[in-house]
Image (tube, rainbow, N blue to C red):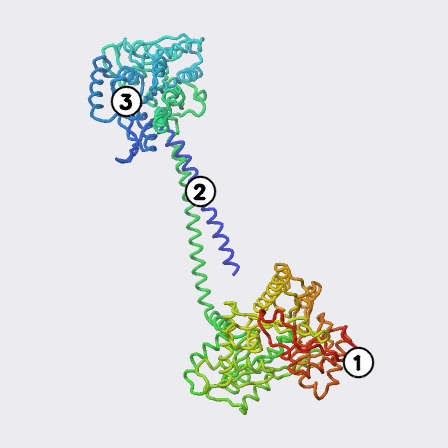
Amino acid sequence: MKHHEKYHNISDILISIGILLFFLFLLFLLRFWNEEIRTKNTAQTQITDTVSPEEGQEKYQFCFLSSYSASFGTFMPQLEGIRSMLDAHQIKLDNFSMNSKKFDSEGDYLAFFYYMQALLKQRKPYDAILVGDDAALEFTMKYQEELFPHTPIVFFAVNNQETAELAAQNDYICGYVEPYFLENTIAAAMKLQPEADKLICIYDDSLTGVADRQNFYALETKFPSLRFGGLDFSNYTPAELRNILSGLDKTTILLYLSAFRDKDGRNYTIPESVALITGASGTPVYHDGYGGFGDGITGGRQLDYAKLASNAAYAAVEIVEKGIPTKDIRLSASAPGTFIFDYKALVKYGLNRRKVPRNAVILHAPGEGMMLYLRIFGIMLLLAASLACFWANASINRWLSERTAEELKASNQGLLALQQELQYEASHDNMTKLMNRHTVVQYLQTRLPMEKQYSAVLMDVDNLKEINESHGHEVGDDYLGKLGQMLREYSYSHKVVAARFGGDAFLIVYLGRVLTQDSEEIQDINHIFKQSIEVGTGKILMSASGGVATSETASGVRVVMDADTAAAEAKRNGKNQIIFYSDKLREKTERDNELRKLVQDAVLEENLYMVYQPQVDCLSGRVSGYEALVRIRGEAVSPGIFIPIAERYGYISTIGRMTTRMVIRQLARWRNEGTALRPISVNFSSYQLNDLGYVDYVFELLEQYRIAAKYLVLEVTESILLEETEHSREMFRRLTEAGICIHLDDFGTGYSSFGYLSYIPISALKIDKTLVDRYLVDNEDLLASLINTIHYLGKRVIVEGVEQRWQYERLHALSCDTIQGYYFSRPEEPEKIRDWEPEEPKISIVPVDGTRAL
């Protein structure tokens, strides 16, 4: 349905666009957060709480000693920076505030010392001390031995360079001075006020203020175009200060550094001092420290106090956890800073915004709120568009589902018909249109228990394989199709069950009837299966082997298994016949099963052994070789019985390898014992042609046991002559080229034809005992002619089954080369046969024709 495919494509496009828009939404939202929320939080230093390590989880305990109170602007950023580092290392932190802005006398310091001394006596020493700003550092240096002996101390945000350097000379103290961005702030102010020729700085007499004053005047040489001047906030009342500041104009750059106590001794917070100064000043006020931005300060570069404190905490962790000596920590002044400007102040003093440093944060910018809302709207629009795509995709899919359901409902009859067709195909053979094996077995399992009488006929086409190989599968398939049609018609007219039971096998079940040898139904079946098929201008008469079983010998589906057994027996007995299952066949089957189990166990348990029957040279009268015969240890079962079972059930290749190995191993033992070696013949079944690795296996054994190939002989039967293939020709070529002789066994019992001798390079023919028994008395000339013909072809003659002296004498007279039989010796185990030689003296009978085999 093409329109469905079109809508599916649209649905895929919509979901792809929706995912893309949602990804863009997340991207812009993250950017908005970084630019608008995170940056402004940094600028305004809005600190969030962190989670400290749970009780009992901390490895160390640190102390943070701050110069200021918790209400002072830099205290919380510093504390947050320290906590962020220590929490990651599971370190507990205690913090103490000196509040030096309010309590800065010697008496105040001494009181704080007594407080700390009493507190520290009640607990174990801290692992490290973190000190923030100048007052806390001077206090720590003064009372180090009493409060923190041999304890690592890391300071930060100290303004006084000389104090910091003096502290760093102590082996237990190191730290970070507060980096000054005063030079950057002055440079930015000069760009905004190019007409300025004076630079005035506001400071006080606090420790921080003293350090600020020193740092301010240290920059005087770097700005020669400006006249430097200072206002000590501690020397003025608020009214006096307002009077001075109100007289300033834009030719003066005014810096606010520290202003915490006035002439009257009143203490000021940063917001209070900023409000006083910016409210009175006639010129822009700049600041490079904490606070005041957005509350009247025009601008400046502000230090990241949280990062500075975090760096100090990291140094303390390195000292404690890694054992780095405190003195190895170098004094540093590196920390990030951010330019911040207030748009309202820029407008108030007529300053050019484009001269503000790049990437500076601009507070209170015009349209800032509208732009913010527009950005938020754009981000939300991306989200809405993404959701709209998802909704449209869901709607299309819902519509497609409903449309599909309608179409499925409308075509229900067609689907039912298709279902029936599929069920028919699953239960019937495609070529013959008959029920398949699985279906007929299921049917019979249900139906046969309901019947009192029934018969099963299983027919197996004999020559279908040869037809396929000789004339092509099209001819064979055509025959099967016609056979299926006839069986279908027969099943309808005679009310029987017909099925294709396997590749060449067909099952016909008669319900309510017990068939006999004379039943008309048997004739019907023979007529159906023995049809001729046309091939080119000729015809081929087909044949089949069948088995019949009835409810009189078995019940249920077992009757089919018995029919199969009877059909297999018909195959073995020459094909093209129908055999009824009987008690005798059942007993034979049971015996075959017992023999199969016997062979299987003998192979798995390696319970086979070899006996050896000597072969006597007629000319010398001495042993010229042996035939190796396999036996099952502890079982009186002839090879003539169990070897066919092994061939039938696929054990012959394994037995063939086992017997070959035992023979070669026996040759090696005789050699090691000093016994002269003679060739040993091993029987080779035509079924062993399927063992593609047999030749390589033989060569490996000969090499392993260091046996020459001439001592191994393979005896093949005449049936192997019918298995001529490229593989078999190559196999025997390799064997003979290696020096292994091939003998043809049982000559005269099967397909005896000298024409086959060109297929396999035979070096000797063994005339079977039955031929000797039949013709040596009444038709000796036939044997003589046969032996002469074999000699003429350059082959040797071996006669087996010789049991009497007169047979030996006559065969000797007929120029037979080698004799084998009970007359000389039965097959014996190697220990008994090793040194055996015939006691009978050599017979000197000159052959009638005066010839010998070459």
Say whether disc 2 or disc 3 marks the residue closer to the N-terminus.
2
Give the residue number, with chain letter if any, for mark 3. Answer: 65
Residue 341 higher or lower than 399, as above or below = above
Q: Could you say which quadrant of the image residue 310 lies in?
A: top left
Residue 826 x %, y %: 60, 77
Which amino acid type corresponds to the residue marked 2 in the rendered image? Answer: Phe
Quadrant in which the C terminus is drawn: bottom right
- Pick the residue in front: 327 or 536: 327
The Cα atoms of the two marked residues, 3 and 1, are separated by: 133 Å
- Pick the residue in front: 58 or 444: 58
Residue 133 x %, y %: 31, 19
- Count residues near mark 1 (Cα–Cα under 10 Å), then give few for <14, some for 14-19, many for 20+: few
Which amino acid type corresponds to the residue marked 1 in the rendered image? Answer: Asp
**Residue 1 in sight from this viewpoint:** yes
Residue 134 x %, y %: 31, 16
Disc ID at residue 23: 2
Q: Are marks 2 and 1 in contact (CB under 8 Å)?
A: no
